Amino acid sequence: MERALESRFDQLRRRHAELGAALSAAGVSGADFARLSKEYSELDPIVGGIENLRRTEADLAAAAEMAEAADDPEMKALAEEEVQALRQRLPELEMQVKLSLLPKDEDDERNAILEVRAGTGGDEAALFAADLFRMYQRYAALRGWRFELLDLSETGIGGFKEAVASITGRDVFARLKYESGVHRVQRVPETEASGRIHTSAATVAVLPEAEEVDVAIDDKDLRIDVFRASGPGGQSVNTTDSAVRITHLPSGLVVIQQDEKSQHKNKARALKVLRARLYEMERQALAATRAADRKSQVGSGDRSERIRTYNFPQGRVTDHRINLTLYKIDKVLSGEALDEVIDALTTADRAARLATAAE
């Protein structure tokens, strides 16, 4: 193994031991204890992987020595069999440790704002946008996340022009960040009498939820308008001016919230979405300055990038970034098989970043 990597392993093990001793010492304050505990818990699986790798290397050396020195044919054969098994296992363990050392996306642990919008395809695109939104809602339920609807614009026939939700839970952004982009559907619309397959699309954006400390919004940069909320077909019409439209003047971003009957709640929700969009703009600007690094990743989060096709006649879902095809479209759309796609994307992204780091 490379000398630099061995040195890095030793450094991490020493730090892990130092943290363990510090946490066991008396008189550690609450704030220090929390900070040290967080670092220790992050290092623990990495050091565990290193220890496992080194034990396996030691076992391999011992088995190879036994195979070399054994006089008994049966004992020699057993030792050689163990040597072969350990040699096959070592590359996987080494890869796991290297992957654990890759820099983490600091936003992975954040909650997320999910935005789904109908694209090209008229009513069929809106119906597909509704299918996607419900897919993420079901997936969130399966993972025990909280899924809160922030804004919904319906077509009146079951489709969504636009739907926005806040998703709260463990590793939400880490799991959903690869979903940003254009999702395409190929199917026969219910309104199509001739049975022709139509292609339409919806756009998904997954934004890391930002705190007030992450994005400073000056009140003088905002224009806030209030108006009377209205729903499709005259439903959900409020009799007070509770709907809120916030325009961020420097960026031109506009956020409208009207789902709550309280103007105060709608304003708070609108600011939450605005903050996430501004934070995402900063992330994208930073990513643009790292063009080479961005190319090595599976998904840039670019909303204009076509990332996936859902083909109903063939029952398949294809992710174009990694050429993955699953013939289980119903299970993907129910959220049950979405992990298979996300796990493959995560693995591919890590492998690409590992290859870049090795260059």
Image (cartoon, rainbow, N blue to C red):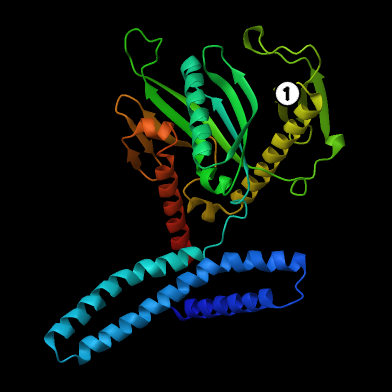
The residue beneath circle 1 is: 260
Viewer-nearest residue: 289 or 137: 137
**For residue 231, side relative to residue 189 (left or right):** right
Residue 342 showing in the rendered view: yes
Q: Percent x, y for residue 338?
A: 43, 39
Q: Does residue 184 sit above or below 9 in this rendering?
A: above
Q: Percent x, y for residue 4?
A: 50, 78
Residue 165 falls in which quadrant of the image? top right
In the image, farthest residue toward the right? 220
Q: Amino acid at mark 1?
A: Glu
Q: Measuring 36% from the left and 34% from the top, which residue is drawn there?
A: 317
Residue 89 falls in which quadrant of the image? bottom left
Viewer-nearest residue: 22 or 6: 22
Q: Does residue 26 sit above or below 264 in this rendering?
A: below
**For residue 243, side relative to residue 152 (left or right):** right
Q: Measuring 59% from the left and 75% from the top, which residue is drawn there?
A: 16
Q: Percent x, y for residue 326?
A: 33, 38
Residue 191 falls in which quadrant of the image? top left
Label 1, secondary structure: give it.
Answer: loop
Q: Measuring 37% from the left and 30% from the top, which residue is drawn there?
A: 330
**For residue 112, side relative to residue 26 (left or right):** left
Q: Does residue 191 sit above or below 275 in this rendering?
A: above
Q: Measuring 13% from the left and 83% from the top, which residue is drawn there?
A: 74
Neighbour class for label 1 at 10 Å: few (<14), some, many (≥20)?
some
Q: Percent x, y for residue 11?
A: 57, 79
Q: Number of callouts in the render? A: 1
In the image, farthest residue toward the left? 73
Residue 359 showing in the rendered view: no
